Image (cartoon, rainbow, N blue to C red):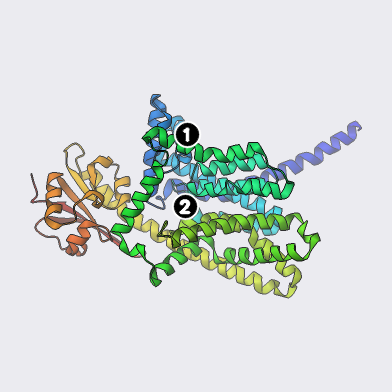
Amino acid sequence: MTKDSRALNSHVTMPATAKHFRFWLTLILVAGVPRILAAFLLPNAFGDAYAYISEVSVLSAKLNAGTFSLTDLYGFWLPLYQLICAVVSVLVGHPYYVAKVVSALFGVGICLLVYELSLRLTENRTASLLAFALIALSPLHIFNSASAMTDIPHAFFVVAGVYFILKKSWVAAAVMIALAGLTRVDSWMLILFIPALQFIEERRVSPVACAILLFPPLFWFYVSWKATGDWLACFTVRKQYMDWLLTVNPGLASFSLKGVARDAGALLLSMDLAVLAACLVGAWLALRRTEFSAAVRDAANTRAALVVNLFFLTFLSFIVFAYLTHKQPIIFPRYGLINFALGLPLLPWTFLKLTGSKPHWRRRLWRAIIVVCLLNASIQLVYSVGFINREYKFGTVAAHLRVQFDQNSGARIFNDEGTVLAVSGIPPENFLSSADAPTEREAFLNYLKEKNVVYLVFIDRVGSTPAKLFPELKHGAGNELFQPVLHARSEFLPEDIWLYRVHGLKK
């Protein structure tokens, strides 16, 4: 190669590299800016987030002090997300914001993977960018990405695992699925997937990949045994929690038309009806083509579509099965976000396959997809805004307690709303709840007296002992024992919360 030709190649390569860099930087900014801003400006999407933040704070403190041990990882949830956040917190502090930003970064990663998977399936850049835009700008995905919970990090590891499976990088796929298995128990059901898929594709199985996949359950059983003496302790605690939940909420132990409609709506809200339809139709198309055409069976994108659909349908079946067996008696909107990320690349793939064989459907299908996706995004936005407003109302009660309650007085606060506890900044040992309180009136009042309760946070919910014993308090009437101090109400996603001063129960 001459000097002139090398110079020409370098001039061609540099602009292409710069263009490629700008393209990916644009994608990162489109997905990242709203998620990072939301992490700093918005509350968490669910009360469990504050429990995760508490675990992160404890772990980071032990890492800082040099007292961390393996048994510190044991808890109600699997530990990977909390450990990642704790390590970062050791370096920069602020575990509250670290936990939210880490989740937000995983959310950005999901958006980029959706683009890559869509491009791999369709080989159509425009269609892939539209799929990317749907998840990058999804209000519910942004809100949950900015919350300190495991839903988004877990989804990232699973989607990354699918990406590496399509590339036939079996060990890398096993690593991603193993990381998912250290984040949520749900992914343990995937342990057999990679060996099975590798055997179908290559008629061999990687021992290294199998060993990696087996690590999460074996590691967790060991941690549980080391911490409690029982290798199944975590599952015992989870069963006890579920038994308690169904006891205090007997309505959850059976199905009602209203409850099923609510839960199905929550799942569809996060999954998107257009994505669900595309996955079901896409599965039929892929299987049909596989059955009747050897040429199509060998097409890489058809096999890839089948693999992606397999993961989508597996997680959908897991959610439905857990719901029908009351292992998960409530479906929250965030539960379908993993299906949204897995199924979204199949939306453009199915559209292109259908319109390729039936061009006259193109305009009608395109319009239908736009209408359904815009409607779903609008509902997500309204729901998210309503939820955020409700959390801010809870925050006003928490702020009042933070100022007025003396943490060193030995007094207690009775409270059944986890957000108030978490946002107040008051140590958890200063709070009591219905979980440990007597359910009879006189015994309950004696309990408040013995525990020196000076504030009652009242919220009318099933399972709340104050709501059962003192129903008049939901109207703010008060009585000789409870004096109303503060009232906060959210209109959309209606919720009333009253703060009462307890008097007449002094020891």
In terms of depth relative to the viewer, which is nearer, 427 or 173?
Answer: 173
Where's residue 493, x and y in %? 36, 63
In the picture, residue 388 is in which quadrant? bottom left
Relative to 304, is 18 above or below?
A: above
Left or right of residue 113: residue 125: right
Where's residue 269, x and y in %? 49, 63
What's the residue at 51%, 55% (across, down)?
141
Relative to 219, is 19 above or below?
A: below
Mark 1 → mark 2, Cα distance in angstroms: 20 Å
Say if residue 125 shows up in the picture: no
Q: Quadrant of the N terminus?
A: top right
Where's residue 244, x and y in %? 31, 53
Q: Amino acid at mark 1?
A: Val
Per the rendering, the mark at residue 88 is 1
Left or right of residue 315: residue 474: left
Left or right of residue 498: residue 264: right
Per the image, the residue denoted by label 2 is 144
What's the residue at 71%, 68% (across, down)?
354
